[in-house]
Image: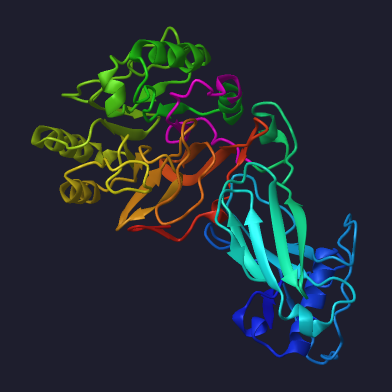
Amino acid sequence: MKTTALIRSAALRHAPAPRLQRARQIALLCALALGACRGERAVDGLEAAAIAGFSLDEASPKEAPITGAAVPGAADPTRPTIAFQPDHLRVYRATPVDFAAVAPQGLPQADWEKARCEWTFGDGSPLREGCDITHTFNRGTSDERVTLSVAVGGETFSATQIIPLERLSVSGGGASLAGVPGAIPSAPAKGDGNLRVAFLSATADEGTDWAGLMATIKTLGPSLVVHLGGVVGPDAEGFHAWEAVREALAEPLRREGVPLVWALAPSDLAGDPLVRRPSAGLEADDFELAPDSVFPNRYAFAYQGVYFAVLTGAEQSKEDLAWLRANLTEAQIYESRIVISHLPLHPFSAASTAVLGPKFKLYELLLRTRVSALVSAGQGVFFDGRYGALPVLSVGRISGAPAALAGHDFVQPPTLVVVDVVRGQLERTFALEHTPEGSWGLFDAQYLPETVEVYTR
């Protein structure tokens, strides 16, 4: 029977004393890394990790008393100590950790069962009681200090334990992409209907790592880069924000011959956007935009066999809807039709309440015109899934205040999202996350929940 390494199920907490003794003995061996609880690690989600378990040997003696032992580095094995599992916190992930207070040597079991344990965590959460508990650390940005206070046998003891953050290899911007052969899928071969699109958003923060971002984009080798808005922050001065993104992103991409497409946020439009029509390189002509396009508010174009339509703002007018329907209907000759909007049809997170509308008219329109994906970024989180029958993609942010998926309590790291199109069909989607060390590596999509609000994976 599988259970957690530190015996936190209600059944074991209320089990007869001999079995509890056996459970805590094994838990202590786990903490000492003696291999007593090595098991298969299950695929886990964002809100509740499945920790490596072990099987209780029902044939083993259950009357074996717990003797206690010192955690490595403990100064006094006669004092209570802290056992915990897993042995590190995940970077930019929520990590549930099982804690157990371990009895000091020589303490009668009857006294230990009357012990009162209080835990203080260094993440600002309230004090917790109980000698076997689980606590979730949500930040994933630093080591965390845990303090245990135990009142037992008329005395009060304390113990402190550092829960370390996972240590990642340090590399320069973009270098991590080549660190593991095959970790990042190769870009599709050049040709009509084959392209790699890189999506990013929310670059308003002055601390944006532009050099690392550009190095990563060059390593990815996209055919097209789409900035989904968030150039100008709520309190930022528009001109300087646009100058910064022009110098750090737009002009380097032009020199590389990579077209840059804009899908602006309402705050961007209010800041007198300095944006060029998409073009491939310094000497290339602008893309041919669809009839009745109003750049940058609404426009559409075909590129390498894929059709793109860009919307700006929240509530779309009747004229906007008629324009979108007409152009997407004409675009049925293309294998894929991708609609890009800063705002989604429905929130992915609590980061913003603004959505694209009218929701159900747009939903029906996009289904009837067989849109391959609706891509948005206004919620600041990465999620690849469906809204009803409509494929949707939420692009995380590069900088600024981090956000969490709706209904989940951890924040996502900065992400850059890539979509590969092969022979006109959307073949794969993956995200790269920015680590505290300044490198970019694959975001593990297995941590994404199966459902978020009305969205499903």
Q: Where in the figure is residue 232, as x and y percent of width and height?
A: 37, 22
Left or right: residue 287 compared with residue 449: left
Prevailing SS of the magenta stretch: loop
Q: Quadrant of residue 272?
A: top left
What color scheme is it? rainbow
Q: Is residue 261 visible to us here?
A: yes
Q: Is residue 21 left or right of residue 4?
A: right
Residue 270 image position (x, y, % from top left): 26, 20
- Locate residue 182, reporting x and y percent: 68, 43
Q: Quadrant of residue 114?
A: bottom right
Find the magenta span and give its range: 184-212
User: Residue at coordinates 31% horizontally, 22% vertically from top-left?
Assistant: 268
Instruction: Tell me which residue sits at (44%, 8%) in the image.
Output: 282
Coordinates of residue 99 in the picture (x, y in percent) = 69, 65
- For the N terminus, the image quarter is bottom right
| Visible residue check, residue 250 | no
Query: Which residue of the protein is positioned furthest toward the front in this rendering?
Result: 154
Name the side, left or right, on which 162 lies relative to 393: right
Residue 361 in magenta?
Answer: no
Q: Nearer the viewer, residue 416 or 378?
A: 378
- The residue closer to the viewer here, 293 or 176, is 176
Q: Residue at x 33, y 19 (%)?
A: 287
Farthest residue, direction top:
283
Looking at the rendered structure, the number of numbered marks drawn on it comes to 0
Q: Is residue 254 above or below residue 109?
A: above
Q: In this rendering, is residue 341 above or below 144?
A: above
